[in-house]
Amino acid sequence: MGTRTTRRARTCTLACVIGALIFFSLLSDGATRAYGAATNVPAIEQLLPASGFAKGWVREGKVELFTKENLYEHINGEAELYMPYGFEALAYAVYGKSGTKEALAVDLYRMGSAIDAFGIYSNYRSPDAETVKAGAEGFFDGSQLMFYQDSHFARISASGEGTPDKAAFMACAAAIGKELPSPARPPKEIGLLNIPQVVLKTEKYIAESLLGYAFFKKGLTAEATLDNKTVKVFVVLGDSPEAARQTLDLYINSLRAAKVEPRNIEKKGTFTLAAKDPLYRGLVIRQSGPYLFGVTNLENPEKGIPLLDELEKKGK
Amino acid sequence: MKRRDFLKIGIVGAASAAAGLTGLRGASGAEGAGPVYRILGRTGLKVTVVSFGAMLTPEHEVMEAAFDLGINYVDTARRYMNGRNEEIVGRALKGRRDKVFVATKTQPGSISRKDIITDVETSLSKLKTDRIDVIQLHNLTGKDKTRIMEPETRAALLELRKEGKVRFFGVTTHTDQAEVLDALLADPERLFDTALVGYNFKSAPAVKEAIARAAKAGVGITAMKTQAGGYKTEALGKMSPHQAALKWALMDQNVTHAIPGMKDMSMLQEDMSVMGMRFTARDARVLDRYAEAVKGVYCHLCAICEPTCPKKVAISIINRSLLYAESYGALDLARSTYAEIGTASSASACGACEVCVAQCAHGLDIGLKMKRAKSLFA
């Protein structure tokens, strides 16, 4: 009896030790990924430019760091926008130009992935804004420059009295970009919208509730031109063909619950669903592999099918 | 079938399918049967108790659906999405402007006449409207509540009102809400008519009391952050405190309305259906359970406890370190945060006390937390 108890106690101790080791290794793994203590991921504060990124520009005060828990202290309620995009950390610093009252405030966000960084960037980008050469893509609107690169999103804003010239913004962006992981190119998912009809700079990645439907968990949207009218194209990103099919079923159920009966259009063995969506009027949608491709805001759903064909080719 | 009826059917059905919810508008039909209104203080605006927080909504069509279903107040800000959020609201307002009240905010750093006027002019242009119903000074705290009395800010607001570009003035506050609300009452001219206040079932009684004082003085109260952090509670099984939390805020008759953020149709349905519902014993149990679930991690970080500690231990920073370690699994960050505290203020200073006398206004067991910190970070 005593031997059995001792053996059990030893087994329990061993299990506890192994459990604790696994637990702490998981903890430290998560921590290094989030805050850059791993050897190949620099801490986010190290990615901010040092003083002198351009002549006369000096960092003022300390770098401030924010996490999921206190991001709202820095950007107020807007913090909630960042969470679905896998926000991990933010480094913030202000730079002043010697002899002037000009200043630049730099926010550098580490997001969950490259597509997440593009996603948050695309929430801010206006199709009318001037595109600049910064990171994978950037824009400048006179008082702010934003860009994304790899899994990072940078926002450089005029802060003091007067507005610094564009060269200062560009130099600051270049200094940040130099420290960020390369290559500085868009994530591959954006290629799914790379068809001529898509209006450039309207592409967005939505990390939650695409089109305002919770069952469309994540995906891309963009404006497109069809017969001189603006329509919306979208791609729901799924994990597998089965998951995509299930998502389509959820959409069909929601239409039926709204007393809308979708219809199947068959052309050359390809099946497309057409419906009058309660929010988006005429809509066509088609499953292809792990994706659902769709076109909305159509007066005549069938006219959207050629667009769907082109989008589907990008998913092959 | 009219679009409104169509959406009504759609929203109920779609949400049933998507969210697995039942009893969407209340079994009796008396509850949650449609829009419910209250008056927004001395503005006299008759607003829906559930209004629309636009900040997180990428699709204007969701907002259009909300307006078509009767929600008549939308809150956005100059800052959100670098102005893109106001553009999205502007699209949703097209053809509906006269049915919806629009609230937006100046930039947090705007104080001068020029900045305030530029903010409002830009918002008008982005929103594609000729007037803003409520313009709010963004994010006031105890430290900068003096912005309320800033002569240039006030003169600019009055000028904009005279020109018909704005109708009413308000402020927003997440931190030191009671101080900010009291500052509004201390203004002899009572220039600001509304306050957008972070308020939920975890708020300190002082916030509730300040809201009551402000409401009595005619300030229209809009509640935000009604979800108390939105912590994940999967470990406790299915629990949706969202509606209960919203009902809790609206149960306070001094609160005119709330502005939950709505990203999609299922959220819209969930929030819409709260209108007219009562806060029930079941809701209280759900919130109790939720509060219990987050009790170990939900430190308000208010630091009210610190003056009650004779050893001057940095309790809120230590609790933040614990939060990093225990809730976010960020042990390195937890340790580095803890390391910022000098030894004299760290949890090891607790060793000199037999019993912890520090008092948490929200019921946290501070002594236990300090012990945990000591064993984890020592």
Image (tube, rainbow, N blue to C red):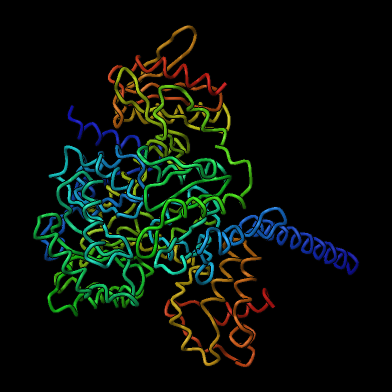
Is residue A101 in view from this perspective?
yes
Instruction: Check the image and report above or below for A99 versus B91.
Output: below
Is residue B293 in view from this perspective?
no
Q: Where is residue A221 in the image (x, y as percent from the top left)?
A: 42, 33
Q: Quadrant of residue A252?
A: top left
Residue displayed at 89% across by 69% down: A2
Q: In this view, does B90 lie to the left or right of A295?
A: left
Q: Position of residue B25 (x, y in %)?
A: 26, 45
Q: In which quarter of the image is residue B89?
A: top left
Q: Position of residue A156 (x, y in %)?
A: 45, 55
Q: In this view, does A36 lie to the left or right of A269?
A: right
Camera-side residue: B41 or B187? B187
Q: In this view, does B44 lie to the left or right of A145?
A: left
Q: Quadrant of residue A275?
A: top left
Q: Residue furthest top?
A: A268
The N terminus of chain B is located in which quarter? top left
Q: In this view, does B59 lie to the left or right of A175?
A: left
Q: Residue furthest right?
A: A3
Q: Position of residue B37 (x, y in %)?
A: 16, 54
The C terminus of chain B is located in which quarter? bottom right
Instruction: Check the image and report above or below for A14 versus A312.
Output: below
Count the marks.
Answer: 0
Residue displayed at 21% across by 49% down: B124
Camera-side residue: A263 or A309? A309
Camera-side residue: B57 or B46? B57
Camera-side residue: A287 or B296? A287
Residue displayed at 25% across by 76% down: B210
